[in-house]
Image (cartoon, rainbow, N blue to C red):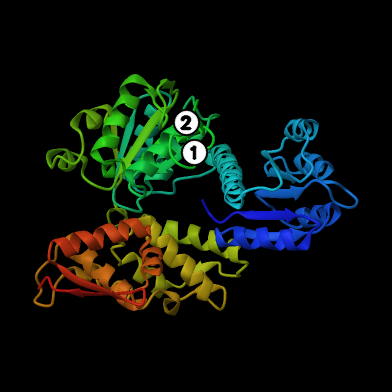
Amino acid sequence: MSSAHVLLVDDEAVAREGLATALRRDGLEVTTADNGEAALALLRQREYEVLLTDVKMPGMDGLELLRRAREAWPGMEVLVVTGFATTESAVEAMRAGAFYYVSKPFRLGEVRKLVREAADKAQLRAENQRLRQLVEHAADERIITRDEGMRAILDIARGVAPTDCNVLIVGETGTGKELLARHVHAHSRRASGPFVAVNCGALNEELLANELFGHEKGAYTGAAQARGGLVEAAQGGTLFLDEVTEMSASMQVKLLRLLQEREYLRVGGTEPVRADVRFLAATNREPRAAVEAGQFRQDIYFRLNVVTLQLPPLRERRDDIPLLAQQFVRRAAQAMGKAVTAIAPPAMQKLCGYDFPGNVRELENIIERGVALAGGTMLGEEDLPPGLGARGGAGARGGSGEVRTLEAVERGHILDVLAGVGGNRALAARLLGIDRVSLWRKLRRYEEQGLIEADETDGALRVRDVSA
């Protein structure tokens, strides 16, 4: 979860500032107020995940603040702290919607843990709401293409969408696998239900199990309350498993049970939970090769591979580059408030001659960068990244004229971008149109194959190609 915003209300300055300092050390953003009226004014200015309030204060007391805050901001969690605890006030606070009622004197560690749990709950609720809003607008998301191969794929996708069969989407990073999954969901009988996506390669085994299945109270240290996972959030809708071939072997066993039995166990649980979801999965690897290498279970592959949709890379659908580029220009210009409306012919020619290892996502990021730099109404060649195309097209041939493999072209482009941004991996991943985990995985593979040498100094990665 990202850093949460906490509003701390207490009329005692020493207690207020001491607790605020402790919460800030936990990475929380804390704003303070010394009375209920000031707190309501702050709540009207911005969103907070957690309100932590004392009860006894001059003017509006904490219970009245609790009632008014829960009525106006139902997505926020409220913790009530008091030095005058009674059973009646505790019951009143919980009935009014308090997340927890804490009596003074309290243990600082306990309050810090409760605030973190309340923040996590509020952020998870907001994320689920965001996912539902994405579902509501999914039908408006268009996959833009004039390529006959892509149109054929969309026809197949629309054909299988009304069924509840599993679909495996295969394609390079950045080809639009999640967008195609949303397209299938939007045309399915589950379109009114949630679409929930999880990147199986971005989390370790423990985190992925917790995210997918949730946990029971006491399942591990800090699990003070039971919490549902993403499978539960997807009930009645679609669960999209991105980078599914990157799951660990033990997680694949748990996934197999979910696929076969349509049930799962929460972390620390013993009672099976039914799952009413439709499964869509995606991978940027060749799944058969992963099965043959023993990295992906064959039985899971067969269960997911009821229908396979193979997305072509952007270099195989070059007629779509101008179409997509113009769409991204309009979108970026609108978001940034810029007057850019078109792409100059030399810039478009350079884009159309480039191989795009990062595919559509890389094109979008390049256009976004260009719109940000453009000074007028036209995105020019000078607004594109330096050296764009140097390793695509003619760059597919080495210095002696031999044809370079696609992997060598991609590796060379990645190293060029890393060098161009001074070894900043986050910025390099953004320009490449891939996430940092995918970039790290590629670099690790190159290093294991003896193709590169890498070292890190002051947070900057220095990489040297030693493949020649």
The residue depicted at 54 percent of the width and 62 percent of the height is: 332
**Residue type highlighted by circle 2:** Glu
Pinpoint residue 7: horizontal percent, then vertical percent.
Answer: 71, 54
Nearest the camera: 141 or 327?
141
Judged from the image, the secondary structure of the residue bearing numbered disc 2 is loop
Residue 83 located left or right of residue 324: right
Seen in the image, is 257 located left or right of residue 178?
left
**Amino acid beneath label 1:** Ala
Residue 223: tell me if it is visible.
Answer: yes
Residue name at image x 25 percent, y 74 percent = 455
Residue at horizontal 51 percent and vertical 30 percent from the top? 191
The x and y percentages for residue 344 are: 46, 73
Residue denoted by label 2: 216
Q: What residue is at 34 percent from the left and 28 percent from the top?
A: 166
Q: CA distance from mark 2 to mark 1?
A: 7 Å
Quadrant of the rendered structure where residue 266 is? Answer: top left
* Quarter-of-image position of residue 315: bottom left
Question: Is 364 drawn above or below residue 165 in the view shown?
Answer: below
Q: Local crowd at mark 2 within 10 Å, few (<14), some, or many (≥20)?
A: many
Above or below — where is 430 with respect to 145? below
Q: Helix or strand or loop: what does disc 1 sit on?
A: loop
Label 2 with label 1: CB-CB less than 8 Å? yes
- For residue 330, side relative to residue 296 (left or right): right
Observer-nearest residue: 319 or 435?
Answer: 435
Front-most of 8 and 366?
Answer: 8
Q: Which residue is mark 1?
A: 223
Q: Which residue is situated farthest in the right direction here?
A: 59
